Image (tube, rainbow, N blue to C red):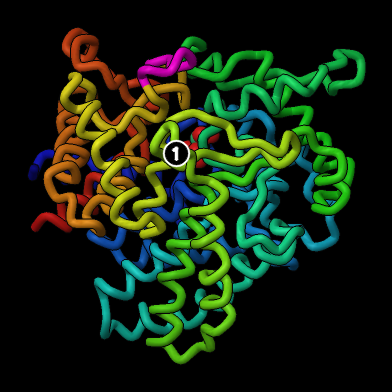
């Protein structure tokens, strides 16, 4: 464990850029939204000032309407990533900051529970408490933005219009929605991907998928990143399990924190009262014993088992009966010699054990599922989730994502995607500290 702590700390220090952390060198050379939340959870164990700065610098990219972009381009000189700040051109929206430059879409709002963890660890540290008082209203504003702009039907479930917002870019969940997009090569702007010259192409999204990501980016830009017009036209409109579960979990954290710090939390309680029942009603799918995402454009559930459904545990959305079914599913995978938790169901025809979000194990997802299982007292499964993650990083390094089939892991020497990855390191540190 000592060696793992040392290695993880040095990854976070190497990826630190005087105020914020990049996920990994070259492949992701800027500040990513939910990555930074997890990164702060790791940093607080060796340097609380870093954790504070990480979050402050992330929120320096918040838009006037409350939206928190998925990438903050603190540097305008990096050229190893596409789409860069100039391609996003967030300035078409008058509420986007001039500096730092940002993207025009968001990512899962982890900040509420990250701030809660920070305050719980340093309950009487004045610097942490005054930082918490400063950040609380900004996180609240972000949540207000979600419920105002991303929930037009006032259902309590928010919408995403780009796969990147879900955090799981090329999940098979999005295949049907993306199939609605017919690419016209003459009108799609010319672009060059950078990711596939840094990382293995077989571990990344396909070029067809990339065209569609760019198409949806262009759609947002065309409408100045304003929801109403985008929603009228977008072929991709999803009520996502992961996104909503994370929002609900962070709402819960804000209620706890707000009460402690003297903020009014009535509005947040109202969101919870609408969101949790709606999540159960609209996103549970009996035949698969899991939560699934809802395709609002097609007015139908997208019926696959995958990691987003398991996030409901983390927000304590399921009753005990449903929670047991999710736990049984993970125990079943474990019994069939899979490391936990594959991002997509290995029994599903669309499973691909190597390709990004179509199957591999993601460290921050194990962190989320681990805490979800613990919340229900599923200690045995929680420990498998944690120990499988430790086993993988010990054997394969602090990578971005990992193979889940034990028979294949045996013959591998490294994980998939980027190496020396920040949230991998941060989740290790946080899990080790929680243990001790
Ligand atoms: C990929 C992941 C996303 C993450 C980003 C930076 O796009 O899908 O979840 O935030 O990389 O690590």
The image quadrant of residue 417 is top left
Examine the rendered structure and indicate whether residue 32 appears above or below residue 93: above
Q: Secondary structure at mark 1?
A: helix
Q: Is residue 300 left or right of residue 359?
A: right
Most foreground residue, 194 or 112 = 112
Residue 23 visible here: no
Q: Position of residue 65 (x, y in %)?
A: 74, 66
At 24% from the left edge and 42% from the top edge, which residue is drawn?
A: 8
Query: How many numbered callouts?
Result: 1
Screen quadrant of the N terminus: top left
Q: Which residues are magenta?
A: 346-353
**Residue 206 in which image quadrant:** top right
Q: Disc 1 designates what residue? A: 286
Q: What's the magenta bit mostly, secondary-structure-wise? A: loop
Rate crowding at label 1 as few (under 14), some (14 to 19) or many (20 or more) other CA atoms within 10 Å: few
Q: Position of residue 245 (x, y in %)?
A: 47, 54
Q: Is residue 218 left or right of residue 25?
A: right
Q: Is residue 323 magenta?
A: no
The residue most toward the front is 287
What residue lies at 63% left-to-right and 22% top-to-bottom? 175
Quadrant in which the C terminus is drawn? bottom left
Query: Visible in this render: residue 304?
Result: yes
308 and 26: which is toward the camera = 308
Q: Position of residue 186 (x, y in %)?
A: 91, 14
Task: Decide if residue 98 is on the left or right side of residue 362.
Answer: right
Quadrant of the rendered image containing residue 219: top right
For ligand 1, tell me if the residue under mark 1 lies within 8 Å: no
Q: Does 211 appear above or below 159?
A: above
User: What residue occupies the far bottom of the structure in this picture?
Assistant: 262
Q: Residue at x 59, y 80 (%)?
A: 267
């Amino acid at each position: 464990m000592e060696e793992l702590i040392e290695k993880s700390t040095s990854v976070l220090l190497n990826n630190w850029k005087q105020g914020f952390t990049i996920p990994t060198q070259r492949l992701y050379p800027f500040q990513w939204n939910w990555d930074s939340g997890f990164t702060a959870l790791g940093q607080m164990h060796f340097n609380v000032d870093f954790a504070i700065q990480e979050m402050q610098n992330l929120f320096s990219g918040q838009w006037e309407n409350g939206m928190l972009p998925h990438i903050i381009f603190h540097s305008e000189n990096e050229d190893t990533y596409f789409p860069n700040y100039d391609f996003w051109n967030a300035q078409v929206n008058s509420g986007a900051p001039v500096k730092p430059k940002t993207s025009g879409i968001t990512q899962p709002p982890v900040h509420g529970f990250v701030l809660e963890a920070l305050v719980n660890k340093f309950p009487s540290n004045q610097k942490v408490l005054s930082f918490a008082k400063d950040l609380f209203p900004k996180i609240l504003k972000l949540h207000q933005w979600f419920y105002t702009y991303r929930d037009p039907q006032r259902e309590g479930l928010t919408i995403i219009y780009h796969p990147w917002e879900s955090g799981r870019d090329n999940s098979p969940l999005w295949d049907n929605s993306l199939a609605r997009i017919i690419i016209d090569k003459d009108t799609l702007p010319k672009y060059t991907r950078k990711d596939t010259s840094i990382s293995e192409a077989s571990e990344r999204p396909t070029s067809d998928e990339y065209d569609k990501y760019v198409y949806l980016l262009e759609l947002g830009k065309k409408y100045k990143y304003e929801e109403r017009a985008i929603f009228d036209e977008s072929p991709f409109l999803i009520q996502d399990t992961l996104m909503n579960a994370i929002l609900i979990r962070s709402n819960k954290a804000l209620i706890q924190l707000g009460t402690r710090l003297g903020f009014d939390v009535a509005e947040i309680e109202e969101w919870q009262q609408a969101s949790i029942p709606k999540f159960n009603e609209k996103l549970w799918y009996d035949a698969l014993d899991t939560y699934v995402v809802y395709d609002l454009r097609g007015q139908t559930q997208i019926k696959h088992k995958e990691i987003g459904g398991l996030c409901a545990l983390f927000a304590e959305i399921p009753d005990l009966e449903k929670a047991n079914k999710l736990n049984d599913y993970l125990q079943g995978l474990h019994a069939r010699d899979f490391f936990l938790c594959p991002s997509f169901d290995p029994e599903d025809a669309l499973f691909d054990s190597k390709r990004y979000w179509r199957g591999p194990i993601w460290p921050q997802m194990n962190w989320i599922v681990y805490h979800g299982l613990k919340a229900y007292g599923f200690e045995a499964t929680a420990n498998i989730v944690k120990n499988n993650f430790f086993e993988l990083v010990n054997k394969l390094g602090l990578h971005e994502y990992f193979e889940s089939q034990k028979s294949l892991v045996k013959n591998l020497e490294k994980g998939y995607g980027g190496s020396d990855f920040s949230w991998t390191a941060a989740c290790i540190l946080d899990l080790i500290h929680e243990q001790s």
